[in-house]
């Protein structure tokens, strides 16, 4: 199949009350793992590239690898820019074959976030590309901020309503208590806030920083309107742990395939588990 836009997958997920997994890739093995897991689960899937992935592998490699994996797959695969930083980067990804972009204007003032999001929508909507925006600040677990500070960074339901009145974005990433990276304790999600946002926002909502969020909390978030769940850290952990175990067991090993093969298998395993939690198995 050719790559599909994310919006299509998310509207189906919204109707079916499940979420599509958006998994971050950094190399060939992870792209293969994501698409192999989706095939095994007969699930739609989103492959996404972070800023770090773009620096490491480059837009063209990520695009070519994912396009090839999608063409060989029997399930719908979308390719998405994660946390796009600028209009120029969005256009580079679109020209390279991405079918969806996130423009992350969350660090700007609301008016500027709206203006940047609209500029992107105007340019890429006619090309059939979907657009995700972010409102509120999701941040990382390493950001040293207090609970009350974090709370003030959460998405405001009233602002979310205004954002939707002034943009025509396909999906909205919300800050409700998750963070990127490994959690120190167990994250506590603000479900009341999510429910209030959902009352005011009709488009599919996106949960970032979902690695390490307990399965039950993820299911509840999906019930309350989350249709796209982003996972990166849990794949990194599985991949690197498997590779480390090979090297610890065989310190003299010099064949990268002996390390990367098991790492890819472990990534497939964790991605399949996530897909089942998101409820998208059998929805391809
Ligand atoms: O945006 C979320 C990613 O997990 C950050 O990944 O370190 O590859 O930019 P990165
Ligand atoms: P985690 O690395 O915490 O899973 O977050 C992934 C993410 O939100 C990518 O945008
Ligand atoms: Zn994110």
Image: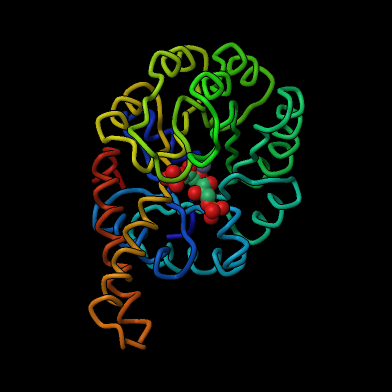
* The image quarter in which residue 258 lies: bottom left
Q: Is residue 272 visible?
A: yes
- Tell me the quarter of the image containing the N terminus: bottom left
* The image quarter in which residue 155 lies: top right
The residue sitting at 29% across, 58% down in the picture is 37
Q: Is residue 69 left or right of residue 126?
A: left
| In the foreground, 47 or 230 | 230
The residue sitting at 68% across, 44% down in the picture is 124
The residue sitting at 55% across, 38% down in the picture is 143
Percent coordinates x, y for residue 123 in the rendering: 73, 42
| In the foreground, 36 or 106 | 106
Q: Is residue 6 visible?
A: no
Label count reads 0
The residue sitting at 31% across, 55% down in the picture is 38
Percent coordinates x, y for residue 81 in the rendering: 58, 50
For residue 104, above or below residue 165: below
Colour pattern: rainbow
| In the foreground, 248 or 119 | 248
Percent coordinates x, y for residue 58 in the rendering: 61, 66
Percent coordinates x, y for residue 42 in the rendering: 26, 52
Q: Is residue 191 left or right of residue 4?
A: left
Q: Is residue 264 left or right of residue 154?
A: left
For residue 13, above or below residue 194: below
């Amino acid at each position: 199949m050719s790559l599909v836009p994310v919006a299509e997958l998310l509207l189906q997920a919204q109707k079916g009350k499940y979420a599509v997994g958006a998994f971050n890739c950094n190399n060939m093995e992870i792209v293969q793992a994501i698409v192999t897991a989706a095939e095994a689960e007969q699930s739609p899937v989103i492959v996404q590239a972070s800023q770090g992935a773009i620096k490491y592998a480059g837009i063209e490699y990520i695009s070519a690898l994912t396009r090839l994996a999608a063409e060989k797959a029997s399930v719908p695969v979308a390719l998405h820019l994660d946390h796009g930083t600028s209009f120029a980067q969005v256009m580079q990804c679109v020209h390279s074959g991405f079918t969806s972009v996130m423009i992350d204007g969350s660090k700007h003032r609301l008016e500027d976030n709206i203006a940047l999001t609209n500029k992107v929508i105007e340019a890429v909507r006619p090309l059939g590309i979907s657009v995700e925006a972010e409102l509120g600040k999701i941040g990382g677990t390493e950001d040293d901020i207090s609970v009350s500070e974090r709370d003030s960074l959460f998405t405001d339901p009233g602002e979310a309503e205004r954002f939707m009145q002034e943009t025509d974005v396909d999906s909205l990433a919300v800050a409700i208590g998750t963070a990127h990276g490994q959690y120190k304790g167990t994250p506590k999600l603000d479900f009341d806030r999510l429910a209030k946002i959902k009352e005011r926002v009709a488009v599919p909502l996106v949960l970032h920083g979902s690695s390490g969020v307990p399965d039950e909390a993820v299911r509840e978030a999906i019930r309350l309107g989350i249709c796209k769940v982003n996972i990166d850290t849990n794949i990194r952990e599985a991949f690197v742990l498997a590779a480390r175990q090979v090297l610890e067991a065989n310190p003299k090993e010099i064949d990268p395939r002996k390390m990367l093969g098991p790492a890819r298998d472990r990534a497939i395993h964790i991605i399949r588990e996530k897909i089942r939690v998101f409820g998208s198995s059998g929805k391809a």
